[in-house]
Image (cartoon, rainbow, N blue to C red):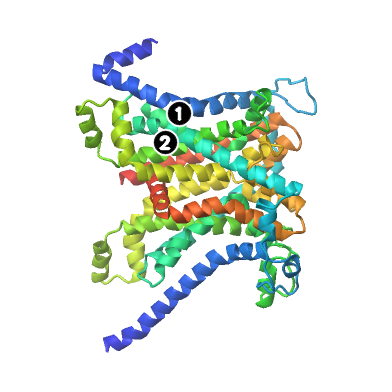
Amino acid sequence: MAGSARRPRRLLRATILYGAMIAALAAILAPFAWLLISSVSRPVDLLAKPLSFIPTSISFDRYAALTIAANPDSAAVGFRAATMNSLVVASVVTVVALAVGIPAAYAFARLRFPGRGWLVLAFMATYMLPPIALVIPLYQIMSGLAWLDRPIALIVIYSSFVTPFVIWLMRGYFESISPELDDAARVDGCSRLGALVRVLIPVSTPGIVSTALLAFLLAWDEFFYALIMTQTNAAKTLPVALNDFIGRHGIDFGMLAAGGVIAAIPPVLIAFVFQRYLVAGLTAGGVKG
Amino acid sequence: MAGLTAARRRLRPAAVSEAWVAGAFVTPAALVILLVVAYPLVRALWLSLHEVVLTRPGEEPFIGLASYAHELANPDFWAAVGRSLSFTIASTALELVLGVGLALLMDQPLRFRWLLRSLVILPWALPTIVNALMWRWIDNAEYGALNALLLQAGIIDSYQQWLSNPATAMWMVILADVWKMTPLVAILVLAALQGISREQIEAARVDGAGPVSTFRYVVLPLLTPTLLIVLVLRTMEAFKVFDIIWIMTNGGPANETQTIAIYAYQTAYRAFDFGRGAALGYLIALAIMLLAAIYLRLLGRVGRS
């Protein structure tokens, strides 16, 4: 009796759960699917009423125009320059932030020194500071150095908030590794630096990979400073170039979609290929205090 | 100097050398961070105490706290604060509730669960600007997919101006933010769920607790630390929101989505009033630091109990 009463309930439960899963998948995929479809649809299909969601024909012309086509128009030239600028800025920032952030994270995780507590707080506070509080003086400084509209300005500014982020993640990661490991290395005659470079960094490779990827994504995503510090193709990054698209391609929404998809390729690839590392890094950073 | 030697005397010789090593390890990071932050903070304070309007160069008189007083008495400022609070509360609440639901779903032993677990990261991975552009296009009044979908499903009877209607614009921005950030919450909560031992849940079940009360009295308390940290991170991010709103609505229609960061930006870079812009920047920073301090105390209390 109990079994026959349980079966419909189990069926109901399964229906609800699988229904919820389909709804969740649809909610996650549909908006992005529409972006992809828009990027390959002809304007006739995109501007049709009633809209038929499935295009009558598809073409990858917009992708070609933005990336490899010869004789690019000014928008495509700008887009290509912005892609390069974004790659350069995000890569250099990642390298700088890891190079200075990892030793600092090690010090915070392992060494006792005066001022350690408030220094950690000060670093974290700089990460929380809203850019709007710093942007005006930074703009004046960059203008004084003649660094406006040059990638170096963005590299310097981004490094200042990506570094605390790296310290936060790597400190948590180092703390999860047994101190006996570097104590053993030190007994064997390694200096602190030796222990860090020869022992701790090699065993921390997964943590460093996830931190590097998250740092890259943070720099890749930045818009506000780039909007204010850059004016031309010499330094504009992808978010700014896409912002320009709104004015320039006001009618060709497909072009906006194609540009958006291209800008999303590196982070989306990183997210799917390194998913396990990223999730580990996110949970370590998010959950550890 | 005297403080330093006193501090050094209290430390053992080994600790002194450890402090030197720590200094060498921390200094590069400190330079990279503080060179960019320390001077601008001081300079911003100076600007906020002077009248600095770019259209009137040369004259920068000291005006004390007048810029702050002006803003604190300005209804436009408070309206922007209110909009920031609405955005923050609505988006954070939705992200927490939906994120926990999504995490619970991903924790169920379902077929194709792996599909959901691997695809869930997609919205989070999309750059903020791309996300904003995508939703701007979906919400388009003339050709948007949202209008087409809702009309064809019979939910609306005519195309709506989602982003230029003051009644809906903020909600559309919140929707876009929730779509992007809910997966992050779900990923963090799922990790916490996986840390809860099966025995604890089984024990509750054996004691006769249904799924709802098991969640309420066993799972939820164990999730609280994670949820609090998510709450902290999300509210502080949401309170300084700029990009997604700037791309989707530019702060319009009729300033209906002009949050505090947009208001400060427009004051500084449209009116070219750097003095007031700097004062606003300081006010926002103070609000966020206040939030952080409250949260730190909250977290400390939870950590102790």
- Name the residue at the front extreme: A70
Near-viewer residue (A99 or A121) = A99
Near-viewer residue (B31 or B59) = B31
Q: What residue type is labelled 1?
A: Ala
Label 1 crowd bin: few (<14), some (14–19), many (20+), radius 10 Å: many
Check the picture and name the quadrant holding the N terminus of chain A: bottom left
Near-viewer residue (B271 or A226) = A226
Q: In this view, does B287 lie above or below A138?
A: below
Write down the quadrant of residue B17 in the picture. top left
CB of mark 2 within 8 Å of CB of mark 1? yes
- On screen, residue B271 versus residue A283, left or right, reads right
For image coordinates 59% across by 42% down, the residue present is A86
The residue identified by callout 2 is: A167
Residue B292 on image: x %, y %: 48, 40
What subunit carries mark 2? Answer: A
Check the picture and name the quadrant holding the C terminus of chain A: top left
Write down the quadrant of residue B266 in the picture. top right
Q: Is residue B137 above or below residue A181?
A: below
Residue A181 on image: x %, y %: 23, 36
Q: In this view, does A280 lie above or below A231?
A: below
- On screen, residue B102 versus residue A239, left or right, reads left
User: Residue B168, can we see it?
Assistant: no
Label 2 crowd bin: few (<14), some (14–19), many (20+), radius 10 Å: many
Q: Which type of secondary structure does the marked residue at label 2 adopt? A: helix
Q: What residue type is labelled 2?
A: Ile
The residue identified by callout 1 is: B29
User: Residue B71, can we see it?
Assistant: yes
Mark identifier at residue A168: none
Q: Which type of secondary structure does the marked residue at label 1 adopt? A: helix
Residues at marks 2 and 1, CA–CA distance in whole angstroms: 9 Å
